[in-house]
Amino acid sequence: MTITDFHPTAPARSIRTFHPRRGRMSPRQTGALQRLWPRYGLTVPKVPGTPVEPDVLFPRRAPLVLEIGSGMGDATVAMASADPDRDYLAVEVHTPGIANLLDLVEQQSLSNVRVAEGDALDLVSGLPADSLDAVHIFFPDPWPKSRHHKRRIIQPGHVALLRSRLAAGGALHCATDWAEYAEAMRRTLDADPGLVNPHDGFAPRPAHRPVTKFERRALAAGRPVADLVYRRC
């Protein structure tokens, strides 16, 4: 494979929940993408609803965690390394982040991580119903301007889609450092008839969620982080 064989997904949806980004890559990241994409990578089909079979991605059958917006991959690798009995499918649109995650996977010799490039909602629409043990959405774009709220990933239609792919008892775990978005998330998740909140409002910070550089910067700036953990009925 050459670097030209990696083709970021062209936007097909009219309203996106993310900014498509490529960015510059270091020689290490470029090499990781060339070397590891054929083994660990998945390009999200451009047609929403195209089937994506987890059994084809992983060499075993195990509970599956979907990481939406894995960034540079540090948190995904930390969780997957500490949780070898579950498989992790990370989806991201930032090419350097994808390459960095692949490099970390190789460094730690992880067999329970795969990396998808493209729109997370298109990916979810192709996954089988009840196929996910958990969905993690950590620090999604808050789209703070009111006219952009329609781009937020946590909104009723998207939540219904995510919930439909969770197995019974599966967890939808969100985290944000944007207070207004945290309240909007809670209202939306509370309103979904197929989800229950086992906590009294926001959840205590789960120990399994690593503290990332992004979170440290938020806390240093005085922005507290809110966790929301809901489970499918």
Image (cartoon, rainbow, N blue to C red):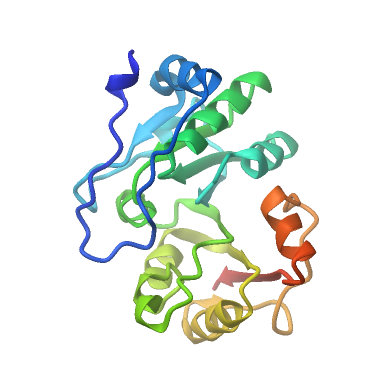
Locate the C terminus and report the quarter of the image it occupies: bottom right
Q: Residue at x 54, y 46 (%)?
A: 70
**Residue 100 x/y as whole percent:** 55, 30
Q: Nearer the viewer, residue 30 or 139?
A: 30
Number of disc labels = 0
**Which of the 4 quarters of the picture holds residue 143?**
bottom left
Q: In this view, does 59 lie above or below 18?
A: above
**Which of the 4 quarters of the picture holds residue 92?**
top left
**Which of the 4 quarters of the picture holds residue 134?**
bottom right
Q: Is residue 193 above or below residue 48?
A: below
Q: Residue at x 51, y 38 (%)?
A: 97
Q: Which residue is drawn at 43% across and 67% down?
A: 153
178 horizontally vs 224: left or right: left
Q: Which of 179 and 165 is in front in this view?
A: 179
Q: Residue at x 51, y 18 (%)?
A: 27
Q: In this view, does 170 lie above or below 119?
A: below
Locate the N terminus and report the quarter of the image it occupies: top left
15 horizontally vs 172: left or right: left
**Residue 5 x/y as whole percent:** 28, 21
